[in-house]
Amino acid sequence: MVAPPQSGTVLSILKTGIIGIIAEYTDPYVGGKLVSMGILPGSEVEIVRRSLFGSSIYARIDDSLVALRKEEAACIVLR
């Protein structure tokens, strides 16, 4: 069993396969964009894979698969 991430961890540094819960967004602009996509606080998130050079992240958020830029993922704080 893998330990859950520590509270305050951002999505961009989460390891593949570890599941976290979205707590908040550090950037209101990016947060608004993510909320409009249905990526809400309280959603379960797991990194599925990263791009070859690490510029983007492929994540499962609740029942959806989403590609995020590393900068967007850095704005998502987990609990």
Image (cartoon, rainbow, N blue to C red):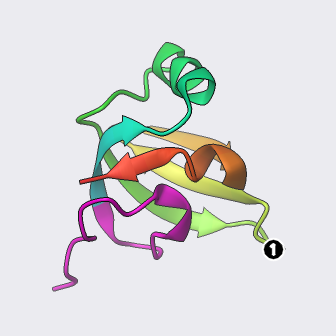
Q: Could you tell me what secondary structure mostly forms the magenta stretch?
A: loop
Residue under label 1, please give it: 52
Q: Quadrant of residue 68?
A: top right
Quadrant of the frame with the C terminus: bottom left
Look at label 1 and name its amino acid: Leu
Q: Quadrant of residue 28?
A: top right
**Left or right: where does residue 32 sit relative to residue 8?**
right
**Left or right: where does residue 41 sit relative to residue 65?**
left
Nearer to me, 65 or 19? 19
Q: How far from the left and from the top, in percent, is residue 1?
A: 15, 86
The outermost residue toward the top is 36
Q: Is residue 22 magenta?
A: no
Q: Is residue 47 above or below residue 27?
A: below
Q: Is residue 3 magenta?
A: yes
Residue at the spot 56% in from the left edge and 33% down from the top edge = 27
Asked whether residue 19 appears in the rendered view, the answer is yes
Span colored in magenta: 1-19
Residue at the spot 49% in from the left edge and 39% down from the top edge = 26
Residue at the spot 66% in from the left edge and 67% down from the top edge = 50
Q: Secondary structure at mark 1?
A: loop
